[in-house]
Image (cartoon, coloured by chain):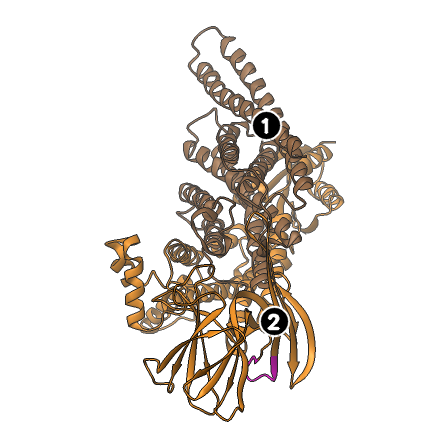
Chain colours: A brown, B orange
């Protein structure tokens, strides 16, 4: 089962790597095609051909990203069978699951908004996360007493992974939005679409993050008798949640719509990463990363 | 701000705005100031500022080491500050002056949270009427400029049909798509308002109310709850839990287990709980399995070594037979120490065992060191002796026996009457969010006005995402064109 899990991981890594390259090609091609058309240089058909190849690159990018999700799912399933608990007990397992979360939310948003240009910004995050997973030890550590709660471990972390994934997609959307803020770049999706797409991602991630914090509180209450103890990791997750809550409110405040809201999404993603990697340096109750 | 925007969107009817009661100039400026203060306190802008300020403060608390709860006196604090000084260097005093080493216990952080909650309450109080109005009595008649300026709008002409007929067809089609449709007519025009999921947005009220509930829960817990984070019982001993209860807990056995690789696998305490001396519970407490009795919970928290001790006076009368938890660590030599009082003599004693797993030249294996103090005020021991396990040893005018090595368990005892409210608030929050996000309030206005050759239909929504979904809109269009 471990071998199966590892093979699936490698297959997913390859598929994701290729998908990232194809998305980048699509993005660059999109730009060239539109610029060629706009400037009307070269033969009349040239721009269209480039656009055709690059758009098929985008299509294959999506296909491969979907494959990567399938392989990651298999990898996580095999690992669950092999270890007997949800694949959420050390940094390797978290990272594979995080990659899965990013891709699943990304594919949903891409499909819903037809904004493939986003892939060029989101898939690199997923690749980085997978690369990180491949550098940390993947051996199975036995669960320390605090983690021996299969139901809560699985649900708490599974929900966190989707929330983190949604915030990553919102981050990609915010970067594109900042590039596109005056709708000056005609080969990118319009700023209204990008704003809406980030917002959609946040309204997936925000309630999920609330649920993560609540489930964490339930668990802490069962295991330690305190639902809240200002432990660094739980505080960091609260801060992340607050910033996205701030973002949701900022969208209805004059002067905060647009650029400042997008900047909040960048800040939020930074905090998401801080919360995520917090296990490594925070100490406290969450210091069971499997890396000590 | 949202309020104002929402009003601008629905264009609330004039009756909704209170006419000013023609005040005198002085009263007017006072009124104005109160009005402005209220508007500021109820603004989403203030909410945003408070949210981000709270986030920044909490982030500082997460990133910087916080003062442990035990550090209370100024001297202790200065000593603690010196411990962290190497880490923060020149910034140490700066952080300390800002109170960033004690964010969560500080008054200013509580004030910040209090302000945030106050803002939530005021915002909600301010908004709910308008919110309810837009649900129960939405404005149906809109001016043509609204249709041209709306975020999402459409316009087409149906030849040869009267406005009322077109209006009826629109209504029928929207009803078929499960919209609520309100219609008003005048001589030459039919006005329609249609919406979907109108109750979904009450979820914002639920979510915001839940935040206030969390505060209420915390207040209830701190007023009527109690917590002992360091309740210690050695094996074989019984201890009262205090806090005005009649409960006592006996530890029969503590066990710690490890995986072959080294990490801990399990901690368990076999305990018996007595209420007024009567056994009421017999249970095994583990990290994820607390014992609960009448709302009071006992959680496994920590453990350590203990020693069973017996003391006799010179007449051979047994003064004490108990187990002593060696729950402290002595700063000077790192030994595990515990204290006990010898009844009827005024004397007290401190027991010390070697640091766990280490060789100690003064205390050989199988022995424990005892320091006897004359009274509670004594600074230096009157006697220091080593006790051999199982043997009686003469110490001054007492005979003391170190019966056996044991373990103690450290439990966290919690009575938290507010906790239930926290869970209610949590469920309310999540359901509220889901109802807002999964069932967005979709609204569309239509104006059918007769022209010389038929009826002109104007259709508009404040924005695309809060208006008709594309599929609904296409169905509507094709139906009208038929």
In the depicted structure, whether residue B309 falls above or below residue B140: below
Can residue B451 be seen from the camera position used here? no
Can residue B167 be seen from the camera position used here? yes
Q: Where is residue B235 shown, x and y percent of the image? A: 58, 73
Residue at the far top in the pictured view: A43
Residue on which disc 2 sits: B297
Q: Residue at x 43, y 56 (%)?
A: B51
Q: Are marks 1 and 2 on the same chain?
A: no
CB within 8 Å, label 1 to label 2: no
**Closer-to-camera residue (B444/B278):** B278
**Closer-to-camera residue (B411/B3):** B411
Judging from the image, mark 2 belongs to the subunit labelled B
Badge 2, how many Cα within 10 Å: few under 14, some, many 20+?
Answer: some
Label the magenta part by its dominant secondary structure.
Answer: loop
In the depicted structure, whether residue A44 falls above or below residue B383: above
Judging from the image, mark 1 belongs to the subunit labelled A
Residue at the far left in the pictured view: B90
Q: Where is residue A56 shown, x and y percent of the image? A: 58, 18
Q: Where is residue B440 shown, x and y percent of the image? A: 62, 48
Q: Residue at x 68, y 45 (%)?
A: A84
What is the span of residues highlighted in magenta in the rendered image? B239-248
**Closer-to-camera residue (B326/B167):** B326
In the depicted structure, whether residue B219 falls above or below residue B458: below
* Res A10 label: 1
Q: CA distance from mark 1 to mark 2?
A: 47 Å
Please check the rendered image and state whether residue B343 is part of the magenta-colored stretch, yes or no: no
């Amino acid at each position: 089962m471990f071998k199966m899990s590892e093979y699936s991981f490698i297959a997913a890594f390859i598929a994701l790597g290729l998908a990232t390259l194809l998305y980048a090609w699509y993005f660059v091609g999109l730009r060239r095609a539109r610029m060629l058309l706009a400037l009307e240089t070269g033969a009349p058909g040239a721009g269209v051909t480039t656009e055709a190849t690059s758009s098929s690159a985008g299509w294959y990018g999506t296909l491969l990203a979907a494959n990567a999700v399938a392989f990651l799912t298999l990898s996580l399933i095999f690992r669950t069978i092999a270890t007997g608990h949800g694949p959420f007990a050390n940094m390797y397992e978290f990272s594979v699951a995080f990659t899965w979360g990013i891709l699943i939310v990304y594919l949903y948003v891409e499909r819903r908004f037809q904004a493939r240009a986003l892939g060029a910004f989101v898939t690199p995050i997923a690749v980085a996360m997978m690369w990180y997973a491949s550098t940390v030890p993947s051996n199975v550590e036995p669960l320390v007493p605090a983690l021996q709660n299969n139901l809560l471990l699985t649900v708490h972390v599974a929900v966190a992974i989707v929330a983190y994934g949604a915030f990553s997609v919102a981050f990609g959307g915010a970067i594109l939005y900042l590039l596109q803020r005056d709708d000056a770049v005609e080969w990118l999706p319009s700023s209204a679409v990008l704003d809406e797409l980030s917002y959609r991602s946040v309204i997936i991630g925000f309630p999920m993050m609330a649920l993560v914090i609540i489930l964490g509180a339930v668990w802490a209450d069962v295991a330690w008798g305190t639902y809240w103890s200002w432990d660094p990791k739980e505080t960091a997750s609260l801060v992340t949640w607050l910033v996205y809550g701030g973002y949701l409110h900022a969208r209805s405040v004059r002067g905060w719509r647009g650029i400042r809201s997008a900047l909040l999404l960048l800040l939020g993603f930074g905090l998401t990463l801080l919360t995520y990697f917090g296990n490594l340096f925070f100490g406290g109750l969450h210091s069971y990363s499997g890396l000590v | 701000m949202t309020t104002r925007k929402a009003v601008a969107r629905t264009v609330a009817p004039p009756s909704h705005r209170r006419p000013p009661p023609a005040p005198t100039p002085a009263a007017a400026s006072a009124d104005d100031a109160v009005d402005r203060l209220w508007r500021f306190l109820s603004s989403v802008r203030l909410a945003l500022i408070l949210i981000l300020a709270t986030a920044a403060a909490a982030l500082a608390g997460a990133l910087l080491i916080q003062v442990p709860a035990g550090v209370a006196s100024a001297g202790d604090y200065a000593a603690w500050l010196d411990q962290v000084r190497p880490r923060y260097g020149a910034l140490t005093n700066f952080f300390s002056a800002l109170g960033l080493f004690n964010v969560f216990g500080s008054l200013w952080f509580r004030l910040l949270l209090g302000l945030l909650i106050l803002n939530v309450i005021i915002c909600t109080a301010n908004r709910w009427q308008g919110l309810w109005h837009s649900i129960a009595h939405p404005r149906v008649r809109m001016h043509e400029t609204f249709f041209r300026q709306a975020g999402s709008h459409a316009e087409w002409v149906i030849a040869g049909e009267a406005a009322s007929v077109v209006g009826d067809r629109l209504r029928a089609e929207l009803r078929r798509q499960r919209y609520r449709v309100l219609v008003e007519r005048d001589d030459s025009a039919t006005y329609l308002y249609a919406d979907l999921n109108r109750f979904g947005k009450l979820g914002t009220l639920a979510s915001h109310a839940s935040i206030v509930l969390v505060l209420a829960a915390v207040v209830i817990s701190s007023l009527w709850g109690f917590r002992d984070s360091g309740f210690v019982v050695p094996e074989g001993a019984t201890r009262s839990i205090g806090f005005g209860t009649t409960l006592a807990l006996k530890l029969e056995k503590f066990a710690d287990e490890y995986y072959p690789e080294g990490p801990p696998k399990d901690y368990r305490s076999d305990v018996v709980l007595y209420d007024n001396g009567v056994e009421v519970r017999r249970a095994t407490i583990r990290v994820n399995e607390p014992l609960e009795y009448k709302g009071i919970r006992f959680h496994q928290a920590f453990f350590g070594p203990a020693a069973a001790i017996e003391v006799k006076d010179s007449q051979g009368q047994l003064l004490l037979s108990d187990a002593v938890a060696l729950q402290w660590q002595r700063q000077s030599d790192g030994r595990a120490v515990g204290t006990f009082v010898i009844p009827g003599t005024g004397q007290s004693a401190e027991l010390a065992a070697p640091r766990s797993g280490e060789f100690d030249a003064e205390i050989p294996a199988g022995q424990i060191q005892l320091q006897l103090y004359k009274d509670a005020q004594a600074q230096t021991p009157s006697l220091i002796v080593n006790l051999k396990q199982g043997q009686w040893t003469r110490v001054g005018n007492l005979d003391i026996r170190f019966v056996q090595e044991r373990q103690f368990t450290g439990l966290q005892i919690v009575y938290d009457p507010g906790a239930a409210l926290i869970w209610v608030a949590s469920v309310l929050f999540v359901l509220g969010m889901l109802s807002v996000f999964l069932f967005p309030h979709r609204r569309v206005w239509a104006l059918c006005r007769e022209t010389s050759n038929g009826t002109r239909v104007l259709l508009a929504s404040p924005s695309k995402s809060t208006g008709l979904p594309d599929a609904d809109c296409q169905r509507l269009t094709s139906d009208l064109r038929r």
